[in-house]
Image: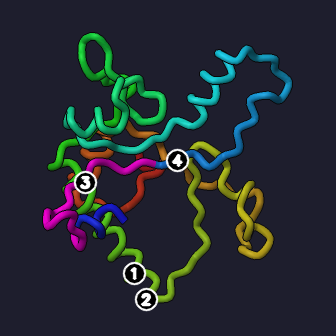
Amino acid sequence: YLFTLKENGQLFGEELVPAGVLYMPSKRVSLLEGRELSMAELRQELYKELRQNGLLLAEGEVLTAMEKDGAGLFVPYKLSKKGIDSRVSSLATLEEFGILERHIRRLLVKMGESLHRGDVAVSPLSGTSEACKYCDYMDVCGFPEDASVPQIPKMKPDEAISHMRGKNTQIPTQADS
């Protein structure tokens, strides 16, 4: 959606420039189960659960517009006394957003060609949770329960950009690493 807006949108006659792409957690927050927390602890846990992940444009004006104090409560960057804390920040340059856009477009073309050929094989991938365990279509998909599901490895943003710079449109799995 971000790149479609960038390509087709305007605001006050100006072209749109990506400021970031963020994913809001959709999991249920169950902070109270079996725990007694003070209000301060509850607030801290809630902020941690609701923190978005994604990628932001590495420009100070953009970052402070998203979270003025730079505390990193809801967005994936944090300011320290020394500047941006790279340990908890997911930032990219405009050039890197361009790399991401080209990579996504290649993947979409590849997916469209695959669907056009009739390739609709069941091939789940899993990240940090077991994808099949929560899937609404598990009963009808035919994927064997005991089959191993390829895992998507966690990558740091610079590793992902490096991967996308290459023209590899395969999603890497742990076996590829």
**Residue neighbourhood size for the residue with mark 4, other residues' Cα within 10 Å, grouped as few (<14), some (14–19), many (≥20):** few
| Marks 1 and 4 close (CB-CB < 8 Å) | no
* Residue 97: numbered disc: none
The residue stretch that appears in magenta:
7-22
Q: Is residue 58 above or below residue 141?
A: above
Q: Tell me how far mark 2 sits from mark 1, CA to CA.
A: 6 Å
Say whether residue 104 is left or right of residue 46. left
> Foreground: 40 or 78?
40
| Marks 3 and 4 close (CB-CB < 8 Å) | no
Where is mark 4, residue-wise? 24
Say whether residue 160 is left or right of residue 39. left
> How many numbered tags mark residues here?
4
* Precedes in sequence: disc 2 or disc 3: 3
Residue 109 locus on image (x, y percent): 33, 76
Where residue 29 sits, quadrant-wise, is: top right
Q: Is residue 56 magenta?
A: no
| Marks 2 and 1 close (CB-CB < 8 Å) | yes
Q: Residue at x 57, y 37 (%)?
A: 50
**Residue neighbourhood size for the residue with mark 1, other residues' Cα within 10 Å, grouped as few (<14), some (14–19), many (≥20):** few
Extreme residue toward the right, this view: 34
Q: Tell me how far mark 2 sits from mark 3, CA to CA.
A: 31 Å
Where is mark 3, residue-wise? 18
Residue 37 locus on image (x, y percent): 75, 17
- Secondary structure category for the residue under label 1: helix
Q: Residue at x 32, y 48 (%)?
A: 20
- Secondary structure category for the residue under label 2: helix
Looking at the image, is mark 1 or mark 3 nearer the viewer? 3
Q: Tell me how far mark 1 sits from mark 4, CA to CA.
A: 27 Å
**Residue neighbourhood size for the residue with mark 3, other residues' Cα within 10 Å, grouped as few (<14), some (14–19), many (≥20):** some
